[in-house]
Amino acid sequence: MTIKNRYAALCAIPALAALALPTTPALAAAPKAPAKPVLTCKTKAAEGLTYTVLKASKGAKPTDDARVVVNYRGFLKSDGSEFDSGEGAKFRVTGVIPGFSQGLKLMAPGSKYRLCIPSAIGYGEEGSGPIPANADLVFEVELLSFETLPPKPAVPADARACDKTTATGLSYAIGKTGMGATPAATDMALIDLTTFDPATGTILGKQLWERIAVAQATPMFTEALGLMQVGGSYRFCMPKKDDPEGGQSTPALNFIVDLIDVRPAPVEEEG
């Protein structure tokens, strides 16, 4: 190798090294701070709700009878801290706090709203979990879809009330008079039992072919069965009862009892 060529080769070594190795360490990109949520809304709605349309969409809107699918994030208005979020969450429109429910009924699928909910139509004075008492809330909600559920079966308005009252105060009405036996204290009654809301007629429960030992029934139900004959259908009206000690009250409920059959109750053997 000539002196000239050897000099050129030696000069090439630092040049190659400069290409292969950085002269200064690379700096990692600083992570971006999450954007602070916007905690104000522009448009007033009913009962104190305000909202801002972040993304508009046209189409039908959910009602109280609908079940929705949403993405959402919830923030405390006081400090902007996020207390809840969900993707593809499913629930009934009436199954959430009033302010959220009102907001959902303004939206069409594909839209995104910011809802500003005062505590009065949120969680109120009690709060819930990470939500303190009297907290104003802000939600960002995207409505993905909804379906309207069929209405619950209901008793017609003209078949909800009672027009007769016994000496003990039991109210009842005769839907159909029976022709068979009347249950005695030693009998087992076979019944269909329908429970419904007296105000709306909404059927709350239905039990078919229920066996009731008359001797083990409540005094009220024993008296009710004693009015009936097999084949009969009676309606009984139970008014709301308040606990005198300030506890939980019993809501008003009405019952329809269809007396299917009466048989002697099994005799329990003494042990």
Image (spheres, helix red, strand yellow):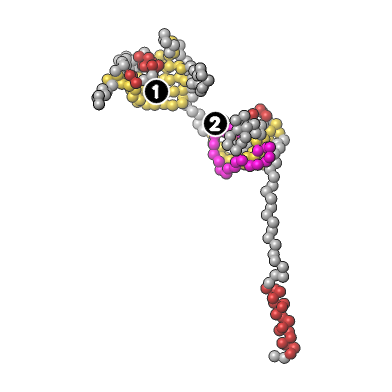
**Magenta segment:** 76-102
Using the image as rendered, state which of residue 46 and residue 9 is in the foreground: 9
Element under disc 2: loop
Q: Nearer the viewer, residue 117 or 129?
A: 129
- Lower position in the chain sequence, tag 1 or tag 2: 2
Residue 78 is covered by the magenta coloring: yes
- Residue 2 in view of the camera: yes
- Figure quadrant of residue 219: top left
The label number, if any, that marks residue 65 in the structure image: 2
- The residue pinned by badge 1 equals 193
Give the crowd class for mark 2: few <14, some 14-19, many >=20 residues within 10 Å.
Answer: some
The residue at the point 26 percent across, 24 percent down is 268
Closer-to-camera residue (156/220): 220
Q: Position of residue 161 (x, y in %)?
A: 47, 15
* Place of residue 141 in the rendered image (x, y in percent of width and height, measured from the top left): 62, 40
**Point 42% across, 23% down: residue:** 194
Q: Residue at x 68, y 37 (%)?
A: 78
Residue type beneath disc 1: Leu
